[in-house]
Image (spheres, grey):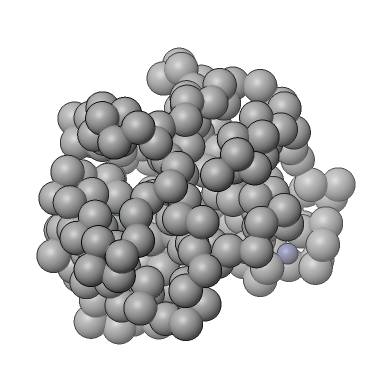
Amino acid sequence: MNVILMGPPGAGKGTQAEFIKTAFPIPHISTGDMFRVAVAEGTPMGIKAKEFMDAGKLVPDEVTIGVVKERLAKDDCAQGFLLDGFPRTVPQAEALDEVLGAMGRQVDAVVDIQVPASILLERMTGRVTCKACKTVYHLKFSPPAQAGVCDHCQGELVQRSDDNEIAVVENRLKVYEEQTAILADYYKNQGCLVAVDGNRDTKEVFADIKAALEKI
Ligand code: ADP
Ligand code: ADP
Ligand code: ZN
């Protein structure tokens, strides 16, 4: 089962990926998470990616495509994958089709999580993540029991550096509209687009996604 989670920053891709993982045994591949690990480790790729991430811009296609190709070649992707935040440009989508085609595979479903722009800003600026286990919270919509502390592992909750500056957050939304939103048409033409209303309770959103994926 080869699935893509699509949607603007703050739509709930990471949140839904956690639910999906519990119901379907496919690896969750988030390019954002992979870049953040590389940044934290200070690898050459991480140092390069950080410049773009801090500005709310996309990491160049050749870097991103290379990272994903390497990841999809790993054994755990043999039965499928859940891509979160990739592809984000037409060249990325074309590169993915090419890689899958060479393996005799294809994209089975693209779940497009739709949330009005007016809601996204608050979603992003209120997001905090556990430094240790990476659980995502929202200061207003899903706060931890104790401020600043993870419910699961007592780890420290931190804000992403690209979520705390309004200009960067706004740029990410603009980049999505300009470069990524068009992919909905790309996948609609392939007949695999599933639009989901993401402006509801997380469990309701997941119920729709689960029903769609069970049909694959
Ligand atoms: P993405 O991966 O698409 O950027 P996240 O899953 O990290 O989005 O969600 C962004 C923020 O919004 C997080 O703080 C998360 O807790 C919160 N969130 C996610 N889904 C919902 C929802 N359906 N209703 C309210 N808040 C949500
Ligand atoms: P969000 O939760 O806001 O959707 P992500 O965690 O997916 O954001 O991505 C964070 C940042 O990582 C992006 O703003 C971008 O700089 C970089 N990034 C992630 N995925 C891609 C991609 N497919 N192409 C280019 N840049 C990416
Ligand atoms: Zn934790």
- The percent coordinates of residue 191 (x first, y second) are 35, 32
Quadrant in the picture for the C terminus: top right
Tell me how many marks there are: 0
Residue drawn at the location 35% of the way across and 78% of the way down: 73
5 relative position to 88: left or right: right
57 relative position to 216: left or right: left
Residue drawn at the location 45% of the way across and 42% of the way down: 109
- The percent coordinates of residue 52 (x first, y second) are 22, 56
Residue farthest to the front, as pictured: 104
Looking at this view, is 50 or 99 the one in front?
99
- The percent coordinates of residue 18 (x first, y second) are 65, 53
Looking at this view, is 165 or 119 the one in front?
119
Looking at this view, is 169 or 32 the one in front?
32
- The percent coordinates of residue 146 (x first, y second) are 84, 50
Residue drawn at the location 41% of the way across and 68% of the way down: 34
Residue 181 appears anywhere in the view: no
Q: Quadrant of residue 96?
A: bottom left
Residue farthest to the right, as pictured: 145
Asked if residue 206 is positioned above or below residue 120 in the image, the reply reads: below
Asked if residue 211 is positioned above or below residue 56 in the image, the reply reads: above
